[in-house]
Amino acid sequence: MSVVLHGVEKFLAAADAKVAAMRVASRDATAKALHLIERRAKQKLGQKSHRPGTPTPANPGEPPALVTGNLRRSITVTGPEAIGPSMWKGQVGPTAVYGRIQELGGIARGRTLPARPYMRPSFEELKDEIVDLFKTAWTEAVLK
């Protein structure tokens, strides 16, 4: 008895194409998610403002108030970059040196500054949307 399978090469090629499509979908979804977080964080940093040298209207726990716009402009996205066959990573956050202390609070120049988070809340608010973004990207890649 012998068994002859026809179309194995076509099947393997189609499977490879789906794997490639999933990689692209994952990369693209990662990039979109990073930019969603960037946009939300920048929105948060524009909710309140004040002139330099005047007290901030932002309460502890609220995003920092806009003074010059430097912190908001410094929020950038890097990546995504591949870290494995089907894994991607990227970063989104401020490059301004005071961005971290605004987010987390701490001591600067002998003064205790309260946390005024803007990055973590941006991510937290978008988690469900980001999950949906990946689900949609993967579904479209599989069904193509």
Image: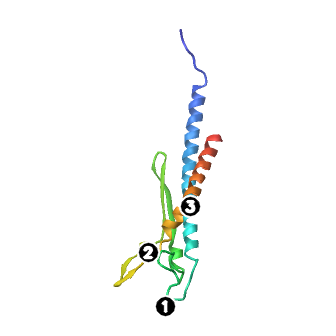
Locate residue 38, reporting x and y percent: 55, 66
Where disc 1 sits, the SS reads loop
Going from N to C along the chain, the mark reached first, 1 or 2, is: 1
Q: CA distance from mark 2 to mark 3?
A: 20 Å
Which residue is situated farthest in the left direction here? 110
Please tell me how crowded label 3 is: few (under 14), some (14-19), or many (20+) other residues with Cα within 10 Å: some
Task: Specify how the rendered protein is coloured.
Answer: rainbow
Amino acid at dot 1: Gly
Give the residue at mark 3.
126
Residue found at x 58% / y 44%: 21
Q: CA distance from mark 3 to mark 1?
A: 33 Å
Q: CA distance from mark 1 to mark 2?
A: 20 Å
Q: Quarter of the image containing the C terminus?
A: top right
Locate residue 31, reporting x and y percent: 55, 58
Amino acid at dot 3: Leu
Locate residue 131, reporting x and y percent: 56, 53
Q: Which mark is residue 115?
A: 2
Give the residue at mark 1.
53
Residue found at x 50% / y 80%: 59
Residue found at x 50% / y 73%: 74
Residue found at x 50% / y 90%: 54
Contact, mark 3 vs mark 1 (Cβ under 8 Å)? no
Compare residues 72 and 135 and report the one nearer the observer: 135
Amino acid at dot 2: Ala
Where disc 3 sits, the SS reads helix
Which residue is situated farthest in the bottom direction here? 53
